[in-house]
Amino acid sequence: MTSKTTLPLYLTATATSLFGNSAIAIVLPWLVLERTGDPAMAGTVAAASALPGAIAAFAGGHLIDKVGRRRMSVLSDIGSAIAVAALAIVDAAVGLNVGWFIALGVLGALFDVPGMTARETLLANVSESSGVALDKVASLRGMLFGLSFLAGPALAGWLLALLPAITVVWLTAACSALAALAIGLMPLLPSTAAATDDNSPLAGFSHIWRSRPLLTLLVVSLGSMLLVAPLLSIVLPAHFVTLAAPGLLGLSLSAYAVGTMTGSGIYGWAFRGRRWAAWVVANLLYVVSAVLIATLDGFWLVAAGMAAAGLGSGLLQPISTVVLTEQVPDALRGRVFGAYAALAMVVSPLGLGLMALVLSGADLRTGAWILAAGWLLVGVYALIAPGLKGFIEPRAEGVHAEHRPVG
């Protein structure tokens, strides 16, 4: 018997957790600057949490399969709430300094990524328990990601303008606590899936390596991450600095976020049962967007490129999540999702480093065209890779027959 409250509670947990993550990404650097006055230190604090986050993604995937995905989601959100609230507690008790910022930033990263992975692995359970198609649940989740990218930082900045930074810290901690409560209360059907005999933490990597379509999907995903990071963090900011128009940078990022929301919505309602068609359209949109952005011609062409990239991202995100959910054995799902997340966290800094290397010997326009060439390679590979079309197309039976205990 399905429950009408399962999906709303899941989406509430997703939304509040995403807002909390968006807010702390704004509030933490603000606090560092307030307390230290050193802009470089804000970057140091952010960089310090990157490696622990990747390790946490890998270890978290193993724990999701071992202790249960619902339990892991709740524990991770409680841990995130404690890590964020500790900023306010330490500030009141002894005062925040660089050491505390790094320590608590690392602690937060150790909880955030496993929590996101656990909620992702709950997708099939939510679909089964709510009676809502898996593709539609993934579409709604993707729309929330786009909304958080658009509204989260803006709302956090608005709160910082109205309230003391420490008050905003408490509100951010409350978001994680609310996410934990929503997942804890969410009705889920009992599970009948059998556990796997392979309890190795490396089972996720091994399963990906043995499956050519999974490996292909991973290559496409990592290739996209490798290109997106330098686009958002280096090429676009540098372009709009040259134009002396920081406001237009914000508008171009907003175009990407709106495109992501729109793409996810279109996937849920217009591409039902036609995942390969959505996959083809998404990869073509990525190539078109890369060419438009690579022109670095003022604002409108670049913004159009960002909107097209957002549409492509909005289509691809739910496809990847649903395909992994359907094709990976339930008892290994946490470790496979965790492996994907861990590798993505390693690839993004690599992309930034490679672009910095390119720009040390070439101008920004050259760097932008190199990214466009990269998108073309990834897009072509995503469309012609053997076996991928059959892997992406929906199964006739879906995933509802087998679920691991959700904890």
Image (cartoon, rainbow, N blue to C red):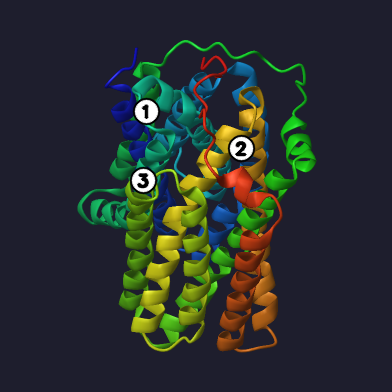
In the picture of the structure, the residue carrying the numbered disc 1 is 177
Q: Is residue 216 above or below residue 140?
A: below
User: What number is the disc on residue 337?
Assistant: 2
- Could one spot residue 172 in this view of the protein? yes
Q: Residues within 10 Å of mark 1 (few under 14, many from 20)?
A: many
Tag 2–tag 1 contact (CB < 8 Å): no
The residue closer to the viewer here, 340 or 2, is: 2
At horizontal 62% and vertical 35% (from top left) the residue drawn is 327
User: What number is the disc on residue 158?
Assistant: none
The residue closer to the viewer here, 265 or 80, is: 265
- Could one spot residue 174 in this view of the protein? no
Q: Is residue 363 left or right of residue 286?
A: right
- Nearest to the eye among marks 2 and 3: give it: 3
Disc 1 on helix, strand or loop?
A: helix
Q: Earlier in the sequence, mark 2 or mark 3?
A: 3
In the picture of the structure, the residue carrying the numbered disc 3 is 268
Residue 117 on image: x %, y %:
54, 35
Q: Amino acid at mark 3?
A: Gly
Q: Is residue 399 left or right of residue 6?
A: right
Tag 2–tag 3 contact (CB < 8 Å): no
At horizontal 51% and vertical 68% (from top left) the residue drawn is 284
- Nearest to the eye among marks 2 and 1: give it: 2
Q: Amino acid at mark 2?
A: Phe
Residue 98 on image: x %, y %:
54, 50
Q: Residues within 10 Å of mark 2 (few under 14, many from 20)?
A: many
* Quadrant of residue 333 within the rendered picture: top right
Cα distance in 3D space between marks 1 and 3: 29 Å
- Nearest to the eye among marks 1 and 3: give it: 3
